[in-house]
Image (tube, helix red, strand yellow):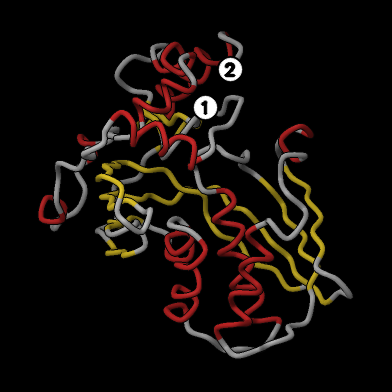
Amino acid sequence: MIGAKAPAKINLFFEVGKKRPDGYHDVLSTYQSLDLFEEVMVEPATDWTISVSGDISAEQLQLVPTDESNLVIKAAKALAKSVGIENPQPMHFKIHKRVPAAGGVAGGSADAAAALVALNEAWCLGLEKSQLAKVAAELGADVPFALLGGTALGTGSGIDLQPLPKLRTQHVLLVFSQPGLGTKEVFEVFDKSFPEGDLIANRADFQTGFNLDLAGRNSLLVPALELRPDLLELMNLVPGVAKLSGSGPTLYLLSEDLMELTGWQKEYQDAGS
């Protein structure tokens, strides 16, 4: 089998404009990849199939689709189409999950990105990363960044990426909770709450890089809390520090001090999170 991996992400900054005629939203997002990777292995098969394992709960693993609605199969078919292959070789995908589904940290998008890299090798396509990124942009706003990694500014629908200077090392605590939140559902609530959007910043504010003091601004916080009011209690366990990633419900906490982060982790463990 041939394998590849791609990182999960957090949104250090995420502002959203009003809904466009094409159904998408203009966003301004600072993406940060994590030292937390999804892995995808591929091998030829008689049909398109998926098996899933991982370091998350059995209940979470069961939420990962194993039919053609999974982004890895969509990625394969989009990749084949992009190079003119009408009847691509069906593949079996072995996905190793490390982040929950519908968590706001792009686990499914990382799977799709890893699948593109693995298939590029398995099918001997020899495509450059920039060519894979064009296919990734068809699959979802977070997939191109999962290919890029690092720190980047996302504009347009989130797929137009500008690498930013590397940030100083931070320890990250992720707080996963259930139930998950569907991105589409959160954006629908956002559109009702902010019909004119909530986009205040602009690209020029990030030309010299990202200031970590700005971390946490997220236009989707209000709609996420409307759908999951209990998240506010989780955030208030470490007031002013716990932030929402993407459409949620995953929270993240940043610190340069590992001992401080360990203390926060105990707060959540004691609370049963």
Is 77 placed left or right of 249 in the picture?
right
**Count of picture labels:** 2
Q: Identify the residue at the far right of this view.
A: 46
Is 157 placed left or right of 148 in the picture?
left
- Identified at 49% across, 60% down, the residue is 143
Q: Report the residue marked by disc 2.
A: 273
What is the distance, in whole Å, between disc 1 and disc 2 at their CAs?
7 Å
Residue nearer the viewer, 91 or 165: 91
Helix, strand or loop at label 2? It is loop
Residue type pointed to by label 2: Ser
Q: Can residue 263 be seen in this view?
A: no
Please provide percent x and percent y for residue 163: 29, 63
Q: Using the image, determine if residue 257 lies above or below residue 183.
A: above
Please provide percent x and percent y for residue 206: 16, 52
- Tell me the crowding category of disc 2: few under 14, some 14 to 19, or many 20 or more residues within 10 angstroms, Cα based: few
- Residue 146 marker: none
Q: Using the image, determine if residue 268 lies above or below residue 37.
A: above
- Identified at 46% across, 81% down, the residue is 131
Please provide percent x and percent y for residue 87: 74, 85
Q: Are marks 1 and 2 in contact (CB under 8 Å)?
A: yes
- Identified at 51% across, 20% down, the residue is 265
Residue nearer the viewer, 270 or 135: 135
* Corner quadrant of residue 272: top right
Residue type pointed to by label 1: Val
Q: Using the image, determine if residue 234 lies above or below residue 130.
A: above
Please provide percent x and percent y for residue 251: 45, 29
Q: Report the residue marked by disc 1.
A: 175
Helix, strand or loop at label 1? It is strand
- Tell me the crowding category of disc 1: few under 14, some 14 to 19, or many 20 or more residues within 10 angstroms, Cα based: many
Q: Using the image, determine if residue 22 lies above or below residue 239.
A: below
- Identified at 33% across, 23% down, the residue is 241
Quadrant location of the N terminus in the rendered image: bottom right
